[in-house]
Image: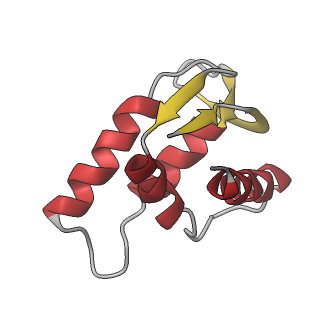
């Protein structure tokens, strides 16, 4: 089991009411999990990703989320997406997942 912390980033999004919101690591994970793999998804891929996303969605910044090893592996295996922007917090998120993968 891994404890995934929804750390705050400096990356912001503007919602439909023009309110800026800081994104967290759970938001970055959702982007990674929602990015289609080359060749598309199988229903099993979808099932695994949806299970992880359901644990991460709507979590407050700083929240600690328990992920089973298989759930974390799903996230880790899908972290290498192509981002449409460059930001130091994307690199920090990747480093965080690598470090978390080394914990026992």
**Dividing the picture into quarters, in which one does residue 90 lie?**
bottom right
Horizontally, residue 31 falls left or right of residue 10, namely left
- Number of marks in the rendered image: 0
Q: Is residue 18 visible?
A: yes
Q: Residue at x 14, y 61 (%)?
A: 43
**x and y, in percent, of residue 97 in the image:** 66, 54
Horizontally, residue 69 falls left or right of residue 92, namely left
**x and y, in percent, of residue 46 in the image:** 24, 55
Q: Residue at x 60, y 36 (%)?
A: 4
Q: Residue at x 55, y 68 (%)?
A: 81
Q: Residue at the front extreme?
A: 104
Q: Residue at the bottom extreme?
A: 39
Q: Is residue 78 visible?
A: no
Q: In the image, is residue 27 above or below residue 18? A: below
Q: In the image, is residue 65 above or below residue 92? A: above
**x and y, in percent, of residue 76 in the image:** 53, 60
């Amino acid at each position: 089991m891994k404890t995934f912390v929804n750390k705050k980033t400096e990356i912001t999004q503007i919602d439909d009411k023009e309110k800026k919101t800081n994104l967290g690591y759970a938001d970055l994970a959702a982007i990674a999990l929602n990015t289609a793999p080359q060749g598309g998804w199988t229903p099993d891929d979808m099932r695994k990703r949806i299970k992880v996303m359901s644990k991460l969605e709507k979590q407050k910044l700083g929240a600690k989320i328990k992920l089973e090893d298989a759930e974390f592996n799903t996230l880790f295996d899908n972290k290498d997406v192509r981002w449409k922007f460059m930001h130091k917090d994307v690199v920090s998120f990747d480093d965080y997942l690598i470090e978390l993968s080394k914990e026992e």
